[in-house]
Image (spheres, helix red, strand yellow):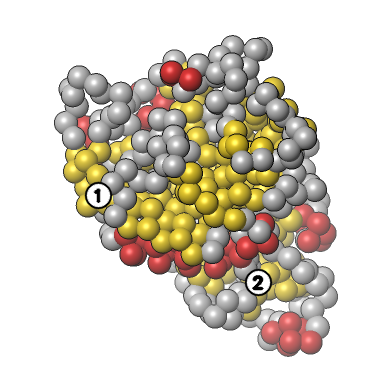
Amino acid sequence: MGRLLWTATAVGLALSGAGGSALAQSPGWYAQGDFIPVERVEIVIANDLNEDRRGQPIVLRRDQLPMLADIQELTATVVDPDGEPRPEPSAAVLARQGPHERRGETNGRALDYQFDDLDKDGIWDELVFVSDLKAGEHKRFYVYRGYQQRGWNPHRTHAAIGSYMRHTVPFWESENVGWKLWFPTDIDIYAKRKPLLMSNRLYMGNLDGYGVSAENPDYGADIQSVDDSFGGGGIGVFEGETLQRPRFSPTADVEHRFNAGQQSDTRYAFEVITNGPVRSMVRIRTMNWNTGQGAYALEQTYSAWAGQNYTTAEARFLTWRPGAQGADFAVGIRRRPGQNFEVQDGNLVVTAAPEALRNPDDVEGLQQQAPILYAGTALVVPDDENGRYQFVETRGGNHVYRIPARADGTYRYMLAAGWSEGEGLKTPQEFADYVAASARSYNSPPRLEGARVEQKP
C-alpha cells in the first residue's frame, strides 16, 4: 500500500529515557465482567504538535508491533486507560443486545478498532483506532490479550461498490461527508445534515443525490458539480505544459465526459479494501491510459475516517512511460462556481461559495433548487511532495497542484468538504480552519514512541 497518511513511525520496542519514564507508573489492569486478562501490550503515541487533536486516526503497522504479529482479532481488546469505564448495562439492554454486549468495565474504556488486511493475504497489516490527543501528549494505550466475544462496534464509516444509474460506482463515507466516483477518477461529494451513514440508500435504492432529502432530510444532498472538471478531487499528469486526464484521452467520448470502449480506451476496476467502524477504503485501478504522448496505469486508494470531513488518498503508478517531454503528477479540485471565499496557502487550497443546489442534468428544471449559504471543498498536498500550485482555467476552472515525478511513483493528498447545513463547520472560515488543522496533522502524524509486553503480577 505504500505510504499511508496516519502511519505512526519511530517505534522503540523497549522504551527508555523520557519514553521509559513515561511508562514507569503503569495504571491498573483493565477488566470487563468476567474478562480478567493477564497480558497486555503497552503502546505510547506521541503528539508532536502543540495543539489538541480530536478524533485522531492512529494507524500502527504490523512490523511495528511484532509481539502482536500472530494475533486473532477476537483475542485483542484495545483500551484507553484514561477513558471513562462503561457501567454494567441494564437488563433491558442485555435483553436487546445479547451476550456480546460489553459488561461493566474497570481501569479504562475499550475502543473500537480494526486489524486491516490491506494486501489480502489473510494476515493483518495495520491496527487502526481513533482517539483524542492533547497538545504535546505522550498518550498510553493497551492491547489486552485474551479471547472474549464482547464489543458491538457500530460502523462510523462505510465503503461499497454499487451499480448506480447503470454503471459501476465506488462509494466511501464518514458520518459527515460521502464521496463517490460517478466519473472514474473525478469525485462527487454528498454532505449530511446529521452524522449518519446513508450511501447504502443511495446505491441500493438508486436515489438521486440531489433529491435524497425527500426520503430523509438528515441525508443531506449532493454538493458537487463535476462535469468535465476535477470535481471534489481528481488526478492527471502534466506532460510538459499539457494537462492530461484519464477520461479525456484522444479516443474518449468528450461530449459525454466518459471514455470510449474498455479495450480501445482507458478502463477502470474498483474494489473495497476494508469496511469498518473507524476506517473504510476503496481502490480504483486505472489501466490502458494512453495520452497520445505517454502510457500510464495506476491505483488510487481512498480512506474515509470516523468523525472527519476529509478523505485521504494515495495514487501509485504501476506504469509510468511519459514521452520525451517527461511528466509530473497532477491533483486538483474544481473552483466552486460563484466562488467568493478562497484560501491558498502553500500546499493547501480551499474554495467555497453560496449555492442553489441543483442537478446539472435536470435541463427541464423539474427538481426544485435548494439554496444554501455555502458549500466548500479543499485539497491538501503534504509538504514533502514539493507540489507547486497553479490555477487551470479550462474545464470548469480548477485549483491544481503539480508534483514532480517521484521515483517510487507514489503520491499522497487529502480532500475535504463542508457545508452550512451540517452540524459543524457552519461557515467558510470554520471550514478553512478545520482544513488547516487537518493539514498540520497530515504533515505531522502521531508518532509511535514505543511498545512493550507486560505480564500481570
Compared with 457, 385 (above or below) is above
Q: Which comes before the other along the chain, label 2 or label 1?
A: 2
Q: Quadrant of the C terminus?
A: bottom right
- Residue 281 drawn at (x, y percent): 58, 41
Q: Which mark is residue 21?
A: none
The residue depicted at 61 percent of the width and 74 percent of the height is 47
The residue depicted at 59 percent of the width and 23 percent of the height is 249
In front: label 2 or label 1: 1
Q: Which mark is residue 354?
A: 1
- Residue 53 drawn at (x, y percent): 50, 70
Q: Amino acid at mark 2?
A: Ile
Report how many numbered discs are placed on residues in the image. 2
Callout 1: SS:
strand
Q: Nearer the viewer, residue 299 or 244?
A: 244
Q: Is residue 256 left or right of residue 382?
A: left
Q: Quadrant of the N terminus?
A: top right
Q: Is residue 138 left or right of residue 109?
A: right
Q: Which residue is mark 2?
A: 45
